[in-house]
Amino acid sequence: MLEKLSQLEQEAQAALAGVVDADQLERFRIDYLGSKGKLKAAMAWLKDASGQEKPALGQGLNILKNRLQDGYERKKGELGSAKPKAAGPMIDITEPGLPPRLGRTHVLTQVMNELIEVFARMGFDVAEGPELENERHNFVALNIPPEHPARDPLDNFYIDDDHLLRTQTSTVQIRVMESTPPPVRIVSLGRVYRPDTHDATHSSMFHQIEGLYVDRQVTMVDLKTTLIQFAHAMFGPEAEVRLRPSYFPFTEPSAELDIKMQVKDHYDWIEIGGCGMVDPAVFEQVGYDPEQWTGFAFGLGIERVAMRRFGISDIRWFYENDVRFLKQF
């Protein structure tokens, strides 16, 4: 009987060692530890055992039962569960899937692409320049003297004594004129930086588009015609353009650009940028002969164009990356 008990233990331990999933573990439990299992059947051996064998056989059966029960629990812990898994895949592949969310171009990028297209139809090329600039391109070549308030260190993001984050994309116009003989007809778009307090209409980082046209006999008539075409393309054929006299160091004469457009239920004049004829002093800085060449320049805030175009009341919404806002455009 003791020999049969030893064979049963070897058989049971081999079966337990071969278990690799919960289904096999459950089958082992039924075969060896269940109410009709082999261990239960071995208990009947006691009535056929001799008087000498009974004590040793009874003790051996109890030891085997405990060993198999402990082995079963360890294997159960290793496998995570002794319950059989449901047959088939865990995911119902016949269920319709969720459609992927499609991205879209940011509203500012949409407006910039439209601006490029509008001015491209009028013959303007796109020029780019660095956002980290030196004082010559940001101030000196634009006829902005050292005592001008725009050069105050508190009104700029200076990196060192000669370098700062550009405050306007006019710097690109200077770089183009330094490297390109006239005639020149370009627009430059990009980020600019000024330490403004953030509110509904101000940000320390925003976007500008600036245009430059240099040729012989360019006049204010050419400037206003260009701006009228821009206004009609971006705000509709009803939009009107008004130039109000102003002052900028790099243009003479200079003007503020107002566009009459619909605001809610009425039309009103809205300031949208500045413009003027390029100052001869700027031409001298880049090596153009002001006796031969004339030109005009203009600058517009792209956020301001977008806000007027779509009725957006807070500039900060452009930068918060709130999908609820962005998906409207």
Image (cartoon, rainbow, N blue to C red):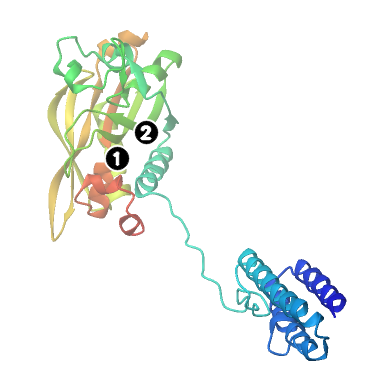
Image side of residue 201 versus residue 235, left or right: left
Q: Quadrant of residue 217?
A: top left
Q: Quadrant of residue 289?
A: top left
Numbered badge on residue 189: 2
Residue 172 appears in the rendering? yes
- For the residues bearing labels 2 and 1, Cβ distance under 8 angstroms: yes
Image side of residue 105 versus residue 166, left or right: right
Residue at x 36% of width, y 33% of height: 190
Q: Which amino acid type corresponds to the residue marked 2 in the rendered image?
A: Leu
Q: What distance separates the C-alpha of mark 2 from that of mark 1?
A: 9 Å
Secondary structure found at label 2: strand
Secondary structure found at label 1: helix
Q: Position of residue 52 (x, y in %)?
A: 81, 81
**Label 2: how many Cα within 10 Å (few below 14, some 14–19, many 20+):** many
Q: Quadrant of the C terminus?
A: bottom left
Q: Quadrant of the N terminus?
A: bottom right
Number of numbered discs: 2
Residue at x 18% of width, y 31% of height: 196
Residue at x 82% of width, y 86% of height: 49
Q: Position of residue 110 (x, y in %)?
A: 39, 48
Residue at x 78% of width, y 91% of height: 47
Q: Which amino acid type corresponds to the residue marked 1 in the rendered image?
A: Ile
Q: Which residue is mark 1?
A: 302
Foreground residue, 5 or 154?
5
Of pointers 2 and 1, the one earlier in the residue sequence? 2
Foreground residue, 158 or 69?
69
